[in-house]
């Protein structure tokens, strides 16, 4: 399966963002990609008021357009993430939707981990506008299961292990990773998640400046289950592609069967809520059993 990661410099200019996204999705499909991934907040990246004004339901204009591209181009499309208006939710969701070649929805994932941090003298408070989801999601693409995650999720290996145990062969990470953290953490974390779970990882990122203070790292990449970077984007709006060989993935998993060597019965999470250290909370529950059930 040929896959592509699309890299954008989205801002608060909604129409321009969609125009560039469509052009690059079409370019990736023309290059032979069967699975294309857009970055986080591909429809809008900007201040809270811009996020709120561009929010839409699942049948809104941007996601309807993405479904149409998937159908017209005969591809699987992970439509990055968009600010979603969810019925009965007080706030928005940061939502990734996967479409099949028929234009129908294959999976919906609402970001679980909110980016509430202070980095490089800038305060990020995602939870001011959006609230966390609580459902893990996978969709099928060409016979392979694809696990959906978004940006900050990358720092939470439990999520990726559960996706692998539930059958993910590929994991997508649409992102707007900060330039400050990206320099030191982006590639390291992506390769670690790929190696730990013996999955292909498609990380589609934002690049460049967006108001009021976003500076995204870019360097979108596709990594194989051995942790090798197969392709990486330059510092511009573009797409990068690579061929995912599932036979080689099977060989890797057979020769180094670490997933089957897990011993869930020996994994005991700290019972003390703050037992892991200052400010760190731990759950008493095991995240996943040997069969992949959470």
Image (spheres, grey):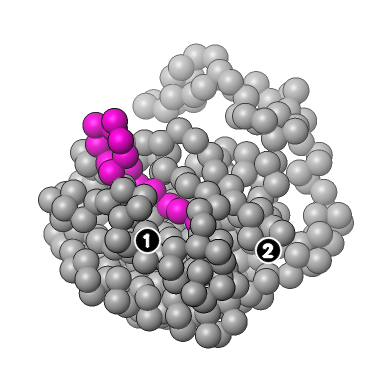
Coordinates of residue 22 in the picture (x, y in percent): 37, 75
Can residue 204 be seen here? no
User: Residue 201 occupies which quadrant of the picture?
Assistant: bottom right
Coordinates of residue 25 in the picture (x, y in percent): 44, 76
Q: Report the side of 157 relative to 292 (left or right).
A: left
Coordinates of residue 17 in the picture (x, y in percent): 27, 71
Please check the rendered image and state whether residue 88 is part of the magenta-colored stretch, yes or no.
Answer: yes
Q: Which quadrant would the C terminus be assigned to in this image?
A: top right
Q: Which quadrant would the N terminus be assigned to in this image?
A: bottom right
The residue carrying mark 1 is 64
Camera-side residue: 246 or 273? 246
Cα gap from disc 2 to disc 1, whole angstroms: 22 Å
Please check the rendered image and state whether residue 220 is part of the magenta-colored stretch, yes or no.
Answer: no
Q: Residue at 24% of width from left, 31% of height from top?
A: 90
Give, as a single range, the part of the protein colored magenta: 85-98
Q: Residue 231 carries which label?
A: none
User: Residue 267 occupies which quadrant of the picture?
Assistant: top right
* Closer mark to the observer between disc 2 and disc 1: 1
The residue carrying mark 2 is 142
Camera-side residue: 95 or 46? 95
Classify 18 as above or below 117: below
Q: Residue at 50% of width from left, 53% of height from top?
A: 105
Can residue 134 be seen here? yes
């Amino acid at each position: 399966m040929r896959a592509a990661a699309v890299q954008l410099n989205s801002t608060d200019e909604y129409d321009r963002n969609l125009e560039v996204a469509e052009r690059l999705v079409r370019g990736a499909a023309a290059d032979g990609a069967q699975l294309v991934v857009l970055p986080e907040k591909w429809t809008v990246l900007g201040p809270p008021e811009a996020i709120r004004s561009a929010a839409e339901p699942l049948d809104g204009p941007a996601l309807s357009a993405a479904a149409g591209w998937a159908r017209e181009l005969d591809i699987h499309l992970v439509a990055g993430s968009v600010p979603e208006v969810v019925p009965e939710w007080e706030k928005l969701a940061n939502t990734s939707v996967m479409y099949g070649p028929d234009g129908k929805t294959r999976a919906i994932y609402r970001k679980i981990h909110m980016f509430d941090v202070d980095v490089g003298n800038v305060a990020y408070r995602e939870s001011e506008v959006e609230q966390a989801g609580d459902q893990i999601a996978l969709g099928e693409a060409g016979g392979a299961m694809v696990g959906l995650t978004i940006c900050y999720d990358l720092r939470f290996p439990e999520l990726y292990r559960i996706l692998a145990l539930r059958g993910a062969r590929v994991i997508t990470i649409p992102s707007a990773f900060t330039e400050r953290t990206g320099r030191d953490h982006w590639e390291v974390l992506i390769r670690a998640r790929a190696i730990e779970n013996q999955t292909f990882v498609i990380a589609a990122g934002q690049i460049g400046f967006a108001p009021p203070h976003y500076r995204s790292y870019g360097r979108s990449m596709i990594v194989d289950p051995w942790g090798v970077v197969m392709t990486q984007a330059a510092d511009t709006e573009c797409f990068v592609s690579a061929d995912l060989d599932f036979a080689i993935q099977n060989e890797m998993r057979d020769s180094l069967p670490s997933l089957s060597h897990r011993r869930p019965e020996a994994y005991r999470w700290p019972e003390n809520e703050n037992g892991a250290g200052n400010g760190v909370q731990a759950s008493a529950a095991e995240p996943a059993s040997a069969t992949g059930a959470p």
